[in-house]
Image (tube, grey):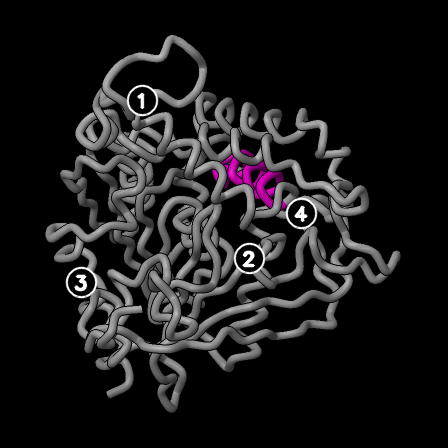
Amino acid sequence: MPDTMPSTSVGLVTPRTETFETPLALACGKELPGFELVYETYGELNADASNAVLVCHALSGHHHAAGYHDLEDRKPGWWDAYIGPGKSIDTRRFFVVCVNNLGGCHGSTGPQSINPATGQNWGPAFPLVTVEDWVHSQAMLADRLGIERFAAIVGGSLGGMQVLQWAITYPDRLANAAVIAATPKLSAQNIAFNEVARQAIRSDPDFHDGWYEQHGTLPKRGLKLARMIGHITYLSEHSMGTRFGRDLRTDSLNYGYDVEFEVESYLRYQGDAFSTRFDANTYLLMTKALDYFDPASLHQGDLSKALAHTRCPFLIVSFTTDWRFAPARSRELANALMRAKRPVSYANIDSPFGHDAFLLPNDRYEAVFTAFMTRAYHDMTRRAA
């Protein structure tokens, strides 16, 4: 953590846990018998609970979106650039909630949790969950917190899919929706990348069909490869070229298979770090949730019909060099909203950083996002007057 806490930081935060004993019926046809959700909040909930903002996380994200857990933290939460006093999601105005999704590996009930039917870890027996299941569980948490309607729900990547599902499933429970660097469904190429990542994990000899903890192993090699594959898709060719080029780690080629190029070293480092902090079964089910998401499938592929009953204004943001969820996918969503006669604003932000741009500081992105959240705040105060 910085020696001096920035005035724009939410400061030290402590995760909370909420326990639900009511079974949750899942889209896969199975039922989750009770569950826990770990979450963080920033700012203060006002008297009529009208200033709440839900932040939805991406595939490898979690509840720690802003601030620091302790004085030894080297980095703040994953969206700290946009959450805090005076930032786009201004915690002087809003009460911010961020939840670790079901199936996660950062405290919420998931494959590493105890299955009450067996007394052992769920492991691969944990049921597949969908974006819709996450939204239902988040709504249950909102009920527990006394939040009937969010002033806004926002998220990037897989988080943006959750925002979209919220607007479809609970149209009366959000006043504004910000869908950032997301897509209304994965392309065949994206599903293919996810499948290669899953096969990297499942083919690791230490995976043991998902029962690795019972065998005292971890499929680190497979998870490392999966992360390396995924990480390539999060970056643009320009950002990788600018950062690494064809730079060698030594003065000459070694004519072997050890690390020679700086980009190889970077990817291996990212993979190694990820393999020790993320659960392989969680990675599998999260990528499946990505693959399954397609709200238009219930309307003969017509996305505008899927969005016809949404009621809130939308902000759609894409980034020019994002090839994982390309700007064309965001335009597809914006056009569908217009066909459904829904209010929508769309911005395609110039950035060299690929899909990861939604996490990074960018003046134009910040200006667009801040303007949207400021309007959400003024709408909220007008309704309360």
Q: Nearer the viewer, mark 2 or mark 1?
A: 1
From the viewer's perspective, is residue 72 above or below residue 252? below
Mark 3: which amino acid? Thr
Helix, strand, or loop for circle 4? loop
Residue range corresponding to the magenta coloring:
282-297
From the viewer's perspective, is residue 55 above or below residue 247? below
Q: Nearer the viewer, mark 1 or mark 3?
A: 1
Foreground: 247 or 58?
A: 247
Which numbered disc covers residue 27?
A: 4
Residue sitting at x 30%, y 63%: 80
Which numbered disc covers residue 261?
A: 1
Which numbered disc covers residue 101?
A: 2
> Is residue 26 one of those drawn in magenta?
no
- Residue, disc 3: 370
Helix, strand, or loop for circle 2? loop
Mark 2: which amino acid? Asn
Residue sitting at x 30%, y 76%: 10
Q: Nearer the viewer, mark 4 or mark 1?
A: 1
Helix, strand, or loop for circle 1? loop
Measure the alpha-carbon separation of dots 2 and 1.
37 Å
User: Which mark sits nearer the N-terminus, 1 or 3?
Assistant: 1
Mark 1: which amino acid? Phe
> Is residue 291 one of those drawn in magenta?
yes
Mark 4: which amino acid? Ala
